[in-house]
Amino acid sequence: MDTFQKKHLINKLPKAFQLYGYGSFDESKPSLKTDFEEIGSEVINGKYMYDKYREFEKGRTAIKLNDYYKSIILLYIGFDDFQKYLDKYKLTDEENKKQLSLISGDKANLTYYYIIYYFGEDERIIKGKTIISNNWKYNLFLCILCPMVP
């Protein structure tokens, strides 16, 4: 939030719709969605970001973000990777141990790929791919439609 306010030279944050860029927000005014899309190569889901912020507001101390959002947020606040962020903002030994366990578990660097098929309502099959990376699941529908075989 500090980075956003400094970048746009504002004292007060806009309302949630505008800040996160979802619903009926004004695309011509500053929003995190627009800022993040300038940095990255993918569309940003403002509602996803807002929901994650709400988790934080409700007191959740460990909030999982997918890799793309983690990397965009880190780049936005001026860091190339998470370790550099942790080096600058020192944690207590207990917090550091917990944080490192979240980012460097035994299966942290493993990626699994699965081909999936979704049977649509129009009697077509949609082929997709599920990727599980760092214990996060991503579904990518390839939008390849083919007639169902009887």
Image: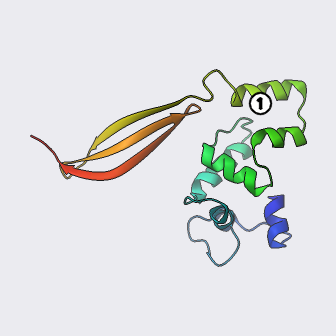
Q: Is residue 71 above or below residue 104?
A: below
Percent of width and height locating residue 83 = 79, 38
Q: Nearer the viewer, residue 109 or 11?
A: 109
Instruction: Tell me the residue that label 1 is attached to.
Output: 99
Q: Residue at x 83, y 72 (%)?
A: 10
Quarter of the picture holding the N terminus: bottom right
Q: Is residue 133 left or right of residue 30?
A: left
Q: Nearer the viewer, residue 59 or 25?
A: 25
Q: Is residue 77 left or right of residue 34?
A: right
**Quarter of the view holding residue 9:** bottom right
Quarter of the picture holding the C terminus: top left
Q: Residue at x 63, y 28 (%)?
A: 108
**Quarter of the view holding residue 104:** top right
* Three-letter code, disc 1: Gln
Percent of width and height locating residue 72 = 68, 53
- Number of on-image labels: 1
